[in-house]
């Protein structure tokens, strides 16, 4: 039985999947298996994955396209390791990633979730490493409160995450009905119950501009988490309420940029204004054309490696 099972959901990432897989096979820590879950890719992604010959790689395939959550769940259910680590098919790990996760597992037995910081790799070759700080953690430690620490840029992405299997037994798997922010939905359930150990070294390369990058598109008709459901489930958790309002703020801006004022109003109405910064409250009130101009400026600065946002400092 391997210590770690690495789950890689795969859909149309033919220009990235080989480098992603090689970044796993080149890990300093070698006690792992890799499960590549092909979600009916229409390019050469799966064929390229098949070219790597390594007994630790297991190839799984859906008979129809089911989405990211279903691909993760297929990998989790087929995994044989005690811990499940996730890696998107366009991201990469640095060689010490799994070794560092193993160190967190050993050092912090009270935790069941584990993650490291990441680098954002832009399409023009520039790299952004956000300067956020996780409260109470210098180099590594247990996150005091995920919800109050994550009101900034995400301090970890799915490709940074490793989960003890007991977590899935307790809070369930990824919600397959959700087609955007699947990780947010899972994080709410998981962090409400379990502790996370975190390392501040950026050991994951997150590809911001890869092909088929859903986060770079609008919400459209995508199904997102039901934040009202979680607010009702945790009525006595102001930390969770603040996190939910932050998520409403992020999604509200996306709806407004799409020109979808019906869903914009539905999303932002439950927000307690005191849970947002003055900049965030202002941005929600701006007309669409100004929001679009600000986004264009932000993307231009980001292409130069400069990160600008309206998020609160953690």
Image (cartoon, grey):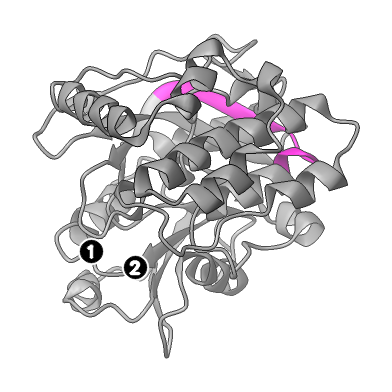
User: Residue 194 or 247: which is nearer the viewer?
Assistant: 247
Residue 221: give x, y in percent of width and height.
Answer: 45, 65
Residue 55's quadrant in the figure? bottom left
The verdict on residue 193 being magenta is yes
Residues drawn in magenta: 190-201
Residue at point 29%, 68% (across, down): 54
In x, y percent, where is residue 5?
52, 59
How far from the left and from the top, in percent, is residue 13?
Answer: 23, 63
Q: Is residue 104 left or right of residue 91?
A: right
Q: Is residue 286 above or below residue 32?
A: above
In depth, the one of 170 and 85 nearer the eye is 170
Q: In the structure shown, which secondary structural element does the residue marked by tag 2 occupy?
A: strand
Q: For label 1, count other residues whose C-alpha is less than 10 Å away and answer few (under 14), some (14-19) or many (20+).
A: many
Label 2 environment density (alpha carbons within 10 Å; few <14, some 14–19, many ≥20): many
Outermost residue on the bottom side: it is 63
* Left or right for 98, reference 262: left
Quarter containing the N terminus: bottom right
Q: Which mark is residue 10?
A: 2
């Amino acid at each position: 039985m391997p210590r770690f099972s690495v789950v890689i959901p795969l859909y149309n990432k033919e220009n990235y999947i080989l480098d992603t897989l090689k970044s796993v096979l080149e890990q300093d820590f070698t006690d792992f298996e890799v499960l590549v879950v092909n979600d009916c890719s229409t390019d050469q992604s799966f064929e390229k994955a098949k070219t790597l010959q390594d007994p630790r790689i297991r190839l799984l395939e859906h008979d129809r396209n089911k989405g990211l959550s279903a691909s993760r769940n297929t990998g989790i259910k087929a995994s044989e390791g005690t811990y499940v680590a996730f890696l998107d098919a366009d991201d990469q790990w640095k060689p010490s990633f799994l070794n560092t996760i193993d160190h967190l597992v050993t050092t912090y037995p009270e935790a069941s979730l584990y993650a490291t910081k990441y680098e954002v790799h832009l399409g023009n070759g520039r790299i952004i490493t956000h300067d956020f700080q996780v409260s109470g953690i210098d180099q590594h430690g247990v996150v005091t409160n995920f919800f109050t620490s994550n009101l900034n840029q995400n301090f970890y992405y799915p490709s940074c995450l490793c989960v003890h299997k007991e977590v899935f037994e307790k809070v369930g798997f990824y919600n397959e009905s959700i087609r955007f922010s699947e990780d947010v939905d899972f994080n709410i359930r998981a962090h409400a119950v379990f502790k996370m150990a975190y390392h501040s070294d950026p050991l994951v390369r997150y590809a911001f501009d890869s092909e088929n990058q859903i986060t770079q598109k609008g919400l459209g008709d995508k199904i997102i988490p039901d934040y009202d459901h979680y607010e009702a489930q945790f009525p006595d958790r102001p930390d969770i309420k603040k996190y939910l309002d932050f998520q409403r703020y992020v999604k509200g801006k996306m709806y407004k940029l799409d020109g979808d004022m019906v869903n914009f109003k539905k999303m932002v109405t439950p927000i307690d204004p005191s849970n947002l910064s003055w900049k965030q409250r202002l941005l929600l009130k701006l007309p669409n054309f100004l929001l679009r101009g600000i986004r264009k400026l932000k993307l231009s600065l980001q292409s130069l490696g400069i990160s600008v946002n309206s998020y609160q400092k953690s």
